[in-house]
Amino acid sequence: MVTSLASGVAAERVLAFDRESGMLTGAGVIDRVAVLALQAGSVLTRPYGHRGYRLGCQLVATAVANRDIIFRLNEDAAFAIPFCGGYWSRMLNRRYYYEEEIEVFLRSAADLRYSFVDCGANFGYWSVLASSRPYGRQPTVAVEASPENAKRLKTNALLNSNRFRWLNAAIGAKAGDFVRITGTRHEALGTLALAHNEPDAVPTVSLDSLLADGLIDASLPGVIKLDVEGMELEALRGSEGLMQRDCVVICEEHGSNRTHGITRHLINEMSLRIFVFDPNRRRFTWLDDVERLDRIKKHAWVGYNVFATSSPLWEARLLSATWRYR
């Protein structure tokens, strides 16, 4: 059950938006005008990969109080973000679906029991959803390297009755190292390897270490979402044991990377089959030619997800999944 008000999200009036009904509550007149502006901005910029949307959000933010808005994603999922935040505010547009290919897949697997591992969890959007009732209440662990993002991750765990575990750590090839987080945008950060522990250092964990420590249930199939800003190959090198099980890994291929190095590694080094979502056919297809990614990556500033597996279970589920929205 979703907690009505979590620690760190307290306010005189809770500003909330229901994605399913479109209802906005706890809003004054200025807040409502701001929401309308943010919704219109998302509609106008969506065909261009939301290019320029962040600047519009910054302008709107100057007119409203500094507070959070809570999205009700479904009847069992709440997700808090800063009001007018330049990345997540596009969720106010009810016709926009964040990474719809992941939503298609997770909804198709709601009748299964699996471990969900959210690497590069950011504020915990997918952890909130995967652990919710409509998605099968999957056992979930979220890993986020940025200490600032991890604070938001903690807030969203609390907001959803602490039903998923979370760690402030960086995913790497092995556990026990340290990194420093670089960059300013919460969705586009980097990591700098350190020789030893220092102030503000973040420890590393590997996917196999999460399995060994019992944070991933070894008895269940696994779904690994891997969005770790350039550390994907290191993370994959630390997943050899896990990937020998019934696992599917969802990897982000950045639009600016025209070599498609992550996908080539998944195919050539890990002998995995790759699937991509075709928005026109509204279903997944097998990627028979890596060069097809040249056509899929329409915007250089956007991330595109590929799904890799050697598991007949997950291959069948991917090929049977269909999109039923819009």
Image (cartoon, rainbow, N blue to C red):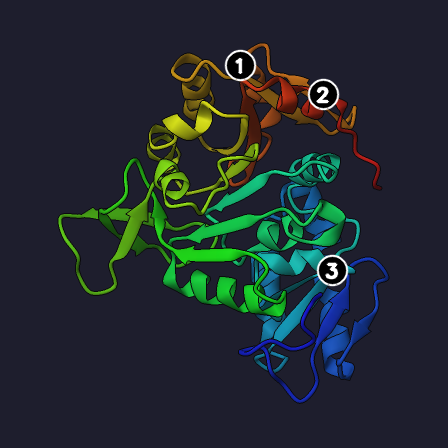
Among all residues in the image, which is located at the extreme front? 219
Q: Can you identify the residue that label 1 sits on?
A: 291
Q: Are marks 3 and 2 in contact (CB under 8 Å)?
A: no
The answer for how far apart the CA atoms under marks 3 and 2 are is 27 Å
**Which marked residue is nearer to the observer: mark 3 or mark 2?**
3
Q: Amino acid at mark 3?
A: Asp
User: Which of disc 2 and disc 3 is earlier in sequence?
Assistant: 3
**Amino acid residing under circle 2:** Leu
User: 289 or 135, which lies in front?
Assistant: 135
Specify the amino acid type for callout 1. Glu
Q: Are marks 1 and 3 in contact (CB under 8 Å)?
A: no
Residue 319 marker: 2
Q: State which tag comes first along the sequence, 1 or 2.
A: 1
Badge 1 or badge 3: first in the primary sequence:
3
Residue at 63% x, 79% y: name it: 63
Image quadrant assignment for residue 150: bottom left
State the image quarter where residue 7 is shown. Answer: bottom right
**Relative horizontal placement of residue 93, taking residue 296 as reference (left or right):** right
